[in-house]
Amino acid sequence: MNTTLEEVELCYKAFYHPSNQFIVIAGNFSKEKVMKEINHFYEHFSFSEQKLTLIPVLNDLSVRKKREIVYYPTSLDYVGISFKIDTSSYSNQELLDLDFYLNCFYHHFFGIISPLYQQLTEEKIITSGIHCSHSMIHNYLMIQIGAYTYDEKIFQKKVLDVIQNRNDFDQKNFELDKKASIVRLILREENIMSMISPFIQNIILYHYPFLDKVEDIEKLTYQDYVSHIKKIDFSHYTITIIRNK
């Protein structure tokens, strides 16, 4: 890394202060007493906030490189396809719904039940699962799909074909995913961190200061799922290949 100590200190002063902090408290307690203790605790500290001019985010869907090879000691080539999607027109609730729909999409189109996975394993193009994930960066959704593969060109082509067509929707699998998600919501109440993590994620990523509820999942429909996935513009992407030099 080329990061200097001065840059680390600058980052700390700019972002590590109470205005960027979450305090999550759970249990049987008096809200007024807890707030009084928290305020009393912070009275003993002095925080200096470093004023910075942040780099403006360009509203540009283009990607800098269409393809890049990274050399790393790996036993098998890894191919990752990253898609850049503009979500500026989505409401916070729509982004939260899209999070669920995307996980259904990954499961149905790239998971072990998908025709693509079965074909690629039978043809020995891949020997392990297809990895799918997404993250939010400002008004852009970044979707990553990748796998360790014996034939990078075939893997790329097959994934991009599935992305372009998006026809293998299955209502039965969608309803099963809804039921599984509802069960997870009910069971997570047994674990405090399982409650805190999604709550913080909702605030940071979607500006939605609430926990997901069973009712939120129940209202999601198969028709909306198909509509959300079909309207995503997957045309802006880059391919990264990790290869043993």
Image (tube, helix red, strand yellow):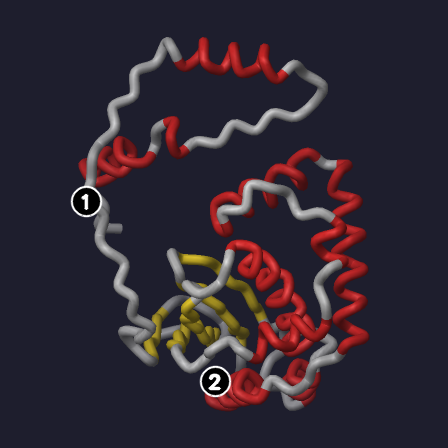
Residue 19 vertical position relative to residue 4 in the rendered view, above or below: above
Q: Residue at x 55, y 47 (%)?
A: 202
Q: Position of residue 80 (x, y in %)?
A: 46, 73
Q: Position of residue 102 (x, y in %)?
A: 60, 67
Q: Quadrant of residue 176?
A: bottom right
Q: Nearer the viewer, mark 2 or mark 1?
A: 1
The mark found on residue 81 in the picture is none
> Is residue 110 rendered to the left or right of residue 54?
right
The one nearer the camera, 22 or 12, is 22
Which residue matches tag 1? 53
Per the model, the C-alpha gap separating discs 2 and 1 is 42 Å
Q: As shown in the figure, which amino acid type bears the numbered disc 1?
A: Thr
Residue 122 vertical position relative to residue 197 in the rendered view, above or below: below
Q: Quadrant of residue 239?
A: bottom left
Which residue matches tag 2? 152
Q: As shown in the figure, which amino acid type bears the numbered disc 2?
A: Glu
> Is residue 119 rendered to the left or right of residue 66?
right
Q: Quadrant of residue 68?
A: bottom left
Q: Position of residue 152 (x, y in %)?
A: 47, 84
Q: Residue at x 40, y 77 (%)?
A: 237
Q: Residue at x 66, y 81 (%)?
A: 117
Which quarter of the image is occupied by the C terminus? bottom left
Q: Secondary structure at mark 2?
A: helix
